[in-house]
Image (cartoon, rainbow, N blue to C red):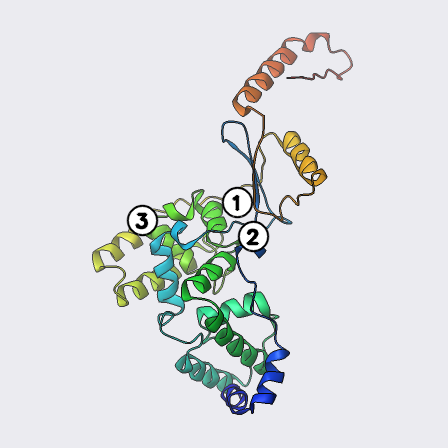
Amino acid sequence: MLLAGLMVVAGMGDVYAEQYLSQLPSVKGLDAATFTGDTFVYDRGGVLLADLGDNGNHRQYLTLKQISPYLIKGTIDVEDKNFYRNAGFDVTGIARAAYDNFRHQKVVGGGSTITQQLAKQLLLTPEQSYNRKVKEVVLAYELSQTYSKDQILELYLNHSYYGEQAYGVEAAARVYFQKDAKDLTPGEATMLAGIPQAPTDWDPITHVDLARARQQEVIDAMVNQGDLTPPQALAAAAEKLTIHPPPNAFRAPHFVRYVQDELRRLGFQPGQQQLYVTTTLDYAKQQMAEADINANLDNQRWRDTSGQLHSAMVA
């Protein structure tokens, strides 16, 4: 059915093909300028006070130069080894997926290139149907004719979901490893590269064993493509990874809420625009002042007969 659908599209006359394409979403304008990113609030010395996401989701756009080459190569090798050579779709992969779909008598997915996955992420609904699959392939071809391979890869790495409310490789690197994507080790990079196909199943926080098995698939794919030597592969697999639970607390939360209100008053959308906000707060001095106040409160407890002793600070 899928192959037949693609053959029908390919065999359409110019007029009908143009009408079909006109009903599809436009592939233009998909760049960093349209990206919804996190808002980062810092104190005056550069200490991060808060990473504000949209409804708890986290995003931060990076260029390819800001991403670990191990993560880039691992993603390509495990997801779409012919990425730089195909036209946005892979005929062999489509044929294999069509056979699997026929065998199961339903659309079971699979066979999607990186470009097809990007089309699905940004331009289509998640429904599983033959019609949507045909649209996915057509849009992938349109994307490949509109953007360079590096642009497509950059968009994919910034939009893919990595679990734990992290969208894109920078958010994932910060959530799982508390570091920037450019600083990931081979072990960390291969762990992240395997997640997007099944973010829930391969979440390294909740399913460590499954995530490790998937990481090994990425490592094996990189060896097969010549992007890791066997000794490098063994070292990556043996790395002791420190995976952190997602951070959910702000430093100076009342001040951060004040900053959010001020940003909204000025016409910004904190959590929905990628902003870097440096404030006047000195967080180290703030902590010192709070410690002094708490110590003074403890010393004055004997005066507190009503249990209502409070304090305030103006700085």
Q: Is residue 31 above or below residue 240?
A: below
Amino acid type, residue under disc 3 in the picture: Glu
Task: Work out which quarter of the rendered image holds the C terminus and state it.
Answer: top right
Which secondary structure lies at badge 2?
loop
The numbered dot on residue 99 is none
* Mark 2 / mark 1, whichever is N-terminal: 2
Q: Which one is nearer the viewer's eye here, 25 or 99?
A: 25
Amino acid type, residue under disc 2 in the picture: Gln
Which secondary structure lies at badge 3?
loop
3D distance between C-alphas at marks 1 and 3: 21 Å
Q: Is the Cβ of the residue at disc 2 closer than 8 Å to that at disc 1?
A: yes
Percent from the top left, x then y, of residue 30?
55, 62
What residue does disc 3 label? 239
> Within 10 angstroms of label 1, few (less than 14), some, or many (20 or more) residues?
some
Q: Residue furthest front?
A: 15
Q: Would you say 254 lies left or right of 216 here?
A: right
Which secondary structure lies at badge 1?
loop
What residue does disc 2 label? 165
* Mark 2 / mark 3, whichever is N-terminal: 2
Residue 107 visible, this orientation: no
What residue does disc 1 label? 246
Q: Residue at x 27, y 64 (%)?
A: 223
